[in-house]
Image (tube, grey):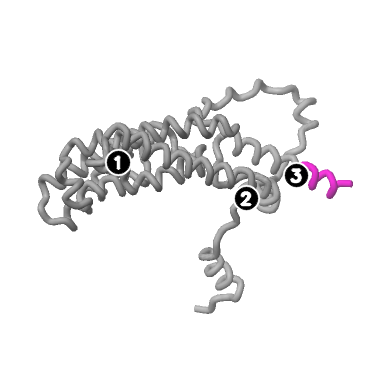
Amino acid sequence: MQVSERGIARLFGRFWPHPMNVRRRDVVLSCLGGALGLALTEWISRLALGVSSPCLIAPMGASTVLLFGVPASPLAQPWSIVGGNLVAALIGVSVAALVPHPAVAAGLAVGFSMAVMFALRCLHPPSGAVALTAVLGGPAIQQLGFQFVLTPVLLNSVALVCLALLVNNLAGRRYPHSLAAPPPQPPAERPSSARSLIVPVSITRDDLHKAMSSVELLDIDEDDLEEILHRAETRARDRQAAQRS
């Protein structure tokens, strides 16, 4: 079977880093917000728990990237982090107590956590690390038992979400994002004379590429997608008008 040079280039091109259309301002805000949010979360947890208990767990670093880096993502919404981490901690501690083999316990804890998070609509990738921490976190975590669920997991999660609410909104970034609005009702039938004036628009891949080039693709919600489609439609209409002239 012969493979064209174009096909090979396309194949290896999939492994090349994708462009990140993120404004410099948003990069700075994400980094500063993440650093501040995680530092304050550790401080709040330390005040509440004292130095004798684990004040902060490593998965919160991954949660911070989502909450401050891509706050529009469904994986970064308050229910996702609080519900996902709570579920994962409960399952992780339970599995660790019932399954003595670490490798088996680790797999079961993460697998069951994913299943429940899907069912409860609180999928949060760092929660997989929370479940893993409950199983493989060592004596300090295992001695906590189900206390690990409340402190530090729930305390860390709630504190981080509260700080994300404050920092993101002060920085002019809407958080949390609302659910998708219901689809609009179809427009009433137009008279035949009006329909004859409507020119069908054919959006090409190039139209979409040009429209998306100015949008922050890492942080996109329904409003952003609507704007992308509007821009692509406008470009397609302008292109077709230029071809007719």
- For the magenta stretch, what is the residue range? 237-245
Q: CA distance from mark 1 to mark 3?
A: 53 Å
Callout 1: helix, strand or loop? Answer: loop
Q: Amino acid at mark 1?
A: Cys
Is 241 magenta? The answer is: yes
Q: Residue at x 79, y 47 (%)?
A: 239
- Compared to 212, does 178 lie above or below? above
Q: Label 2: which residue?
A: 21
N-term mark: 2 or 3: 2
- Dot 2, how many residues are within 10 Å of its Cα: few (below 14), some (14-19), or many (20+)? some
In the image, 52 versus 72, the foreground residue is 52
- Dot 1, how many residues are within 10 Å of its Cα: few (below 14), some (14-19), or many (20+)? many
Query: Residue 92, can we see it?
Result: yes
N-term mark: 2 or 1: 2
Which percent across, then down, holds residue 18?
57, 58
Query: Residue 121, can we see it?
Result: no
Is 18 magenta? The answer is: no
Q: Label 3: which residue?
A: 235
Q: CA distance from mark 2 to mark 1?
A: 36 Å
Callout 2: helix, strand or loop? Answer: loop
State the predominant SS element of the stretch in magenta: helix
- Dot 3, how many residues are within 10 Å of its Cα: few (below 14), some (14-19), or many (20+)? many
| Tag of residue 55 | 1
